[in-house]
Each structure stands twice: as C-alpha cells, then as structure tokens.
Amino acid sequence: MSIIYFLDLFGSFAFALSGALMAIKKDMDLFGIAVLALVTAIGGGITRDMLLGNTPVYILNEPVYIYISIIAAIGAFLFNRMLFKINSIILVADALGLGTFVCIGVSKALEANVTYTGAVLLGLITAIVGGIIRDILANEIPAVLTRDFYAITCIGGGIVYTVLYNYSLSQNQVMLITAGFVIILRLLAIKFKWRLIKALPVLSGENSHL
C-alpha cells in the first residue's frame, strides 16, 4: 500500500467523519448520519470522474471508500460526545484529507491531458465538493465560502503540483510535496485564523433604494 493511497483512505475517513458529525449536530437519525458521511467522503471524487468522463466512477470499482464512510458514520454515532471534545484531531485529519484529495484530483486530470488550469480546478473540485454537498443537505451555508483559507489552500496546492510536474521528480515525490504544502498551509491558516477580506456589512436602511 503506497503512502498516498493510505492518506487517501485516511482522508476519506476524516471527511466522512466530518459529515457524520454535522448530521449529529443537525439531529439526524442513523441513516442521515450515514448519508452525510458518504457524500462528504466521495462527492468530490465522483464529480471529478464524471467531469473527466471516467465511468463507472471510482467507488463502483473500489467499494472500500463506501465501507470506510459507513465505519466513520457508525463510529461518530457511537462516540460523538468524545469526538466533539477533540475537535483539533478532526481538523488535522481534515487537513490531511484535503492535501491528499487535491493531489489525486490534479494527477487524474493531468493523466487525462487536461490543461494545467483545468487540473488545478479539478483538484479543487475533488477536495471541496463533498463538503459543499454536506452543508447544503444540512441547510448550512457551504463552509468553503466562509471558512479560513480553505479553497485558497486547495488552489495553491494545485498550482504547486502543476509546477513540480514539469521537473524530474517521481509522481510520489510530487504528491508528497504537494500534500505536505496543503496540509501545512491549512494548519497554519487554522492556527492563525487567516481569512480573505470580506465586504463591509450593509447597515440598516442603506439598501432601501435597491
């Protein structure tokens, strides 16, 4: 088992766990917990495969990702009180998953002879679409639109991958360096609360003419 494959499985588990915990916060039943866990873990990968025309999509040939999501859902259901107390561990696991998903998305795009810009976009899609689906199903504003430096981290990782791709490095080296970049940048963004600038809030009455 390669390091990247292990990180991919671990990242899928972490994403599934975040989906399951969101479902628990929203007071969903066990089925709802399993659904949110599953879509969070595989939503980005399925979207990527469909855009690339890779059918059947990967989970139909590699059901291990479904099993991992179900295990995460059951684990969250049984141990949710403990998990909510160790949120920092979930954030670190999420960062690991983010870095891995970006790399896998970009690498699959480049294998399909997509342009570098398209590859960066597919890396971003692989990493964030599952979370967007999770938040929409949970009736939340997608966290990627408000969370500190989330999408920007993925874009930066995609750019790093495409730059390193042109050097005489093995694919594993490129993926490990890129994943490390994304993980470190994401953890720094969490620690120092980095955020993009936001528009000033509209005061009451200022938009009455609209």
Image (cartoon, rainbow, N blue to C red):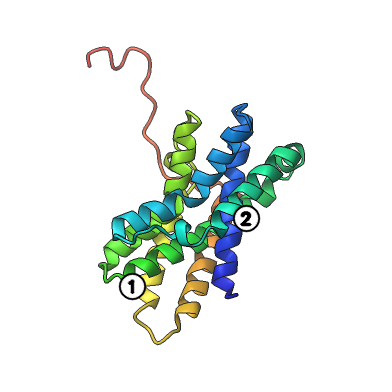
The image shows residue 126 at horizontal and vertical percentages of 42, 55
Q: Residue at x 34, y 59 (%)?
A: 55
Q: Is residue 79 above or below residue 209?
A: below
* Residue at the limit of the structure toward the bottom, as seen here: 168
| Disc 1 element | helix
Task: Give the quarter of the image for residue 28.
Answer: top right
Asked if residue 83 lies left or right of residue 130, the reply is right
> Is residue 114 visible in this depiction of the protein?
yes
For the residues labelled 1 and 2, the Cα–Cα distance comes to 27 Å
- Considering depth in this image, is 97 or 27 the residue closer to the camera? 27
Task: Name the quadrant of the C terminus.
Answer: top left
Against 81, is 156 above or below?
A: below
Secondary structure beneath dot 2 equals helix
Q: Is residue 188 visible?
A: no
Q: Nearer the viewer, residue 33 or 123?
A: 33
Within 10 angstroms of label 2, few (less than 14), some, or many (20 or more) residues? Answer: many
Name the quarter where the N terminus is drawn.
bottom right
Whichever of labels 1 and 2 marks the residue nearer the N terminus, that label is: 2
Mark 1 belongs to which amino acid? Answer: Glu
The residue under label 1 is 111
Residue 19, horizontal then vertical, whole percent: 57, 42
Pointer 1 local density, CA inside 10 Å: few below 14, some 14–19, many at least 20? few
Q: Which residue is mark 2?
A: 93
Counting the numbered discs, the total is 2
Q: Residue at image x 27%, y 71%?
A: 113
Coordinates of residue 45 in the picture (x, y in percent): 43, 55
Foreground label between 1 and 2: 1
Q: What is the x, y in percent for residue 206?
A: 30, 16
- The reply to whether the C-beta atoms of the residues labelled 1 and 2 are less than 8 Å apart is no
Position of 120 relative to 25 (above/below): below
User: Front-most of 4 and 1?
Assistant: 1
Please name the amino acid that badge 2 sits on. Answer: Ala
